[in-house]
Image (tube, rainbow, N blue to C red):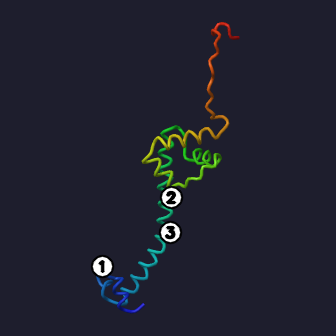
Amino acid sequence: MDKGKILYLAKGFRGRAKNCIRIARERVEKALQYSYRDRRNKKRDMRGLWIQRINAGTRLYGVNYGEFMHGLMKENIQLNRKVLSEIAMHEPYSFKSLVDISKNAFPGNKVHFFVASKKPAALIK
């Protein structure tokens, strides 16, 4: 990079890092390394945030994150974590229906409806 571009990128740095070319070059190179690294870390951090939001939403209904995601996978519901976290925050009724679907994906968690018989309870053996 030429001198003008380096000093332009070093604008806002403190001390001699903004106007002394040798120090500015080192600081700009390091800043570009940080920005390259942190563009990838930002994706990682956002995924963690989405998972925390989904987990908080599912625990309101007695399910943890892993069971919820596994149930969605078994029911072939293909919503990504970003969308699920948005639904959990802004549409709680829709999210509850997703949690119910996920719960019912496992045989032991099926909701059974029993029809009451017409005979009195004393006659049923």
Q: Locate residue 102: give its quadrant.
A: top right
Q: As drawn, is 95 to the left or to the right of 115?
A: left
| Amino acid identity at mark 1 | Gly
| Amino acid identity at mark 3 | Arg
Q: Residue at x 53, y 40 (%)?
A: 97
Distance in Å between CA atoms under marks 1 and 2: 31 Å
Query: Mark 2 — residue?
Result: 47
Q: Are marks 3 and 1 in contact (CB under 8 Å)?
A: no
Sequence order check, earlier mark of 3 and 1: 1
Q: Position of residue 78 (x, y in %)?
A: 59, 53
Which quarter of the figure is the C terminus placed in?
Answer: top right
Distance in Å between CA atoms under marks 3 and 1: 24 Å
- Of the numbered discs in the image, which one, if any, rests on residue 74? none
- How many C-alpha atoms fall within 10 Å of the one at disc 2: few (<14), some, or many (≥20)? some
- How many C-alpha atoms fall within 10 Å of the one at disc 1: few (<14), some, or many (≥20)? few
Q: Position of residue 77 (x, y in %)?
A: 60, 49
- How many C-alpha atoms fall within 10 Å of the one at disc 3: few (<14), some, or many (≥20)? few
Q: Residue furthest front?
A: 118
Name the one closer to the observer, 19 or 118. Answer: 118
Distance in Å between CA atoms under marks 3 and 2: 11 Å
- Of the numbered discs in the image, which one, if any, rests on residue 40? 3
Q: Residue furthest left?
A: 15
Sequence order check, earlier mark of 3 and 2: 3
Which quarter of the figure is the N terminus placed in?
Answer: bottom left
Q: Residue at x 63, y 28 (%)?
A: 112
Sequence order check, earlier mark of 1 and 2: 1
| Amino acid identity at mark 2 | Arg
Q: Residue at x 36, y 85 (%)?
A: 24
Vertical comparison of 72 with 116: above or below: below
Query: Mark 1 — residue?
Result: 12
